[in-house]
């Protein structure tokens, strides 16, 4: 999930499209209503392209009464990587993962600039989340956010827990292969549903694609619940899980069991 208290937050337009206030109180109230015990909070993009400073995410989580845990966004410079590691070490009891915005930054997953971050993440057992698939901006770099671009990193870093966000949409079959091939690679179902004239048909298509990926991977152990709030509402992602043509135990894994294991919640 994303959140800020700034007027230059680039996700405000998605919040307005979804009829959301996009506030900490609204987010926590929604979680309580839907019986979502905990969630991960990530920096939203600001107008101009930079992410919200990580310290603001730490501060928001501190006000959540333990319901939100921070994910530290790492940008592709030595200074930013060092700052991300330092902040994670300072807040090591709270921080649950790192995030790299593939497709939005001018670097690939295997760029040497991230080596120090991966070393630290491996040593602390912290997952690294990667944006994969479609980008919200027309200037996004799909060659870097295409899921198969992570295959090389997964080969080299077998001790690194890798989470491919957004199921690589629209490359669902590529994600299915990656989570099947690599023991250390996972994916999530965040930010998939969208409003529009074909919203219902699109939701059916998404459920079919995700269900087929689960069949290919022989189970749902590698798939995590996520919303990308305010891009997608919690209720919509819960409805997507209910549409999946899989066994109830696999739905339970997606909803919470996998996240507890992967993020040590």
Image: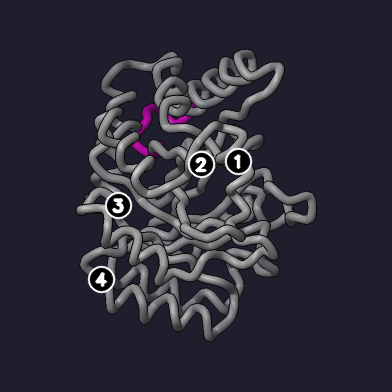
Residue 67 shows in this picture: yes
Q: Are marks 3 and 1 in contact (CB under 8 Å)?
A: no
Q: Of tags 3 and 1, which is closer to the observer?
A: 1
Which residue is depicted at the point 30% across and 28% down? 34
Q: Mark 4 points at which residue?
A: 92
Q: Is residue 45 depicted above or below 178 in this figure?
A: below
- Residue 68: mark: 3
In this rendering, the label closer to the viewer, 2 or 4: 2
Q: Which is nearer the N-term, disc 4 or disc 1?
A: 1
Label 1 residue SS: helix
Q: How crowded is mark 2: few (under 14 residues within 10 Å), some or many (20 or more)?
A: many
Q: Disc 2 to disc 4, how far (Cα)?
A: 27 Å
CA separation in Å, label 2 and label 3: 15 Å
Q: Could you tell me how many numbered marks the image carries?
A: 4
Mark 1 sits on what residue?
Answer: 14
Measure the C-alpha gap from mark 4 to mark 1: 31 Å
Crowd tier of the residue under label 1, counting other residues whose Cα lies within 10 Å: few below 14, some 14–19, many 20 or above: some
Question: Residue 170 lies in what quarter of the image?
Answer: top right
- Label 4 or label 3, whichever lies nearer to me, is 3
Are dots 4 and 1 in contact, CB under 8 Å?
no
Q: Earlier in the sequence, mark 3 or mark 1?
A: 1
Asked where in the image residue 171 lies, by quadrant, the reply is top right
SS at circle 3? strand
Q: What stretch is highlighted in magenta?
A: 216-224
Q: Position of residue 195 (x, y in %)?
A: 63, 26
Kind of element beneath mark 4: loop
In the image, 65 versus 234, the foreground residue is: 65
Say which mark, if any, is on residue 230.
Answer: 2
Closer-to-camera residue (77/11): 11
Q: Position of residue 203 (x, y in %)?
A: 57, 20
């Amino acid at each position: 999930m994303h959140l800020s208290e700034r007027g230059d937050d680039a996700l405000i337009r998605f919040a307005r499209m979804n009829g959301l206030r996009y506030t900490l109180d609204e987010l926590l109230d929604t979680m309580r209503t839907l019986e979502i015990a905990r969630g991960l909070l990530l920096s939203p993009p600001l107008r101009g392209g930079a992410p919200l400073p990580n310290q603001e995410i730490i501060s928001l989580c501190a006000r959540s009464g333990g319901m939100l845990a921070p994910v530290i966004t790492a940008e592709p410079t030595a200074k930013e990587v060092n700052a991300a590691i330092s902040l994670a070490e300072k807040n090591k009891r709270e921080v649950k993962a790192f995030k790299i915005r593939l497709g939005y930054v001018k670097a690939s997953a295997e760029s040497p600039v991230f080596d120090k971050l991966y070393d630290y993440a491996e040593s602390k057992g912290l997952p690294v989340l990667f944006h994969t698939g479609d980008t919200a901006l027309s200037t996004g770099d799909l060659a870097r956010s295409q899921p198969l671009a992570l295959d090389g990193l997964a080969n080299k870093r077998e001790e690194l827990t890798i989470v491919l966000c957004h199921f690589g949409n629209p490359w669902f079959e590529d994600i299915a292969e990656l989570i099947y091939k690599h023991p250390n690679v996972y994916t999530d179902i965040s930010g998939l549903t969208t409003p529009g004239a074909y919203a219902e048909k699109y939701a059916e298509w998404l459920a079919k694609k995700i269900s087929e990926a689960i069949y290919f991977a022989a189970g749902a152990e590698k798939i995590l619940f996520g919303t990308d709030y305010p891009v997608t509402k919690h209720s919509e992602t819960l409805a997507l899980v209910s549409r999946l043509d899989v066994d109830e135990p696999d739905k339970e894994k997606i909803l919470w069991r996998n996240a507890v294991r992967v993020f040590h919640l």
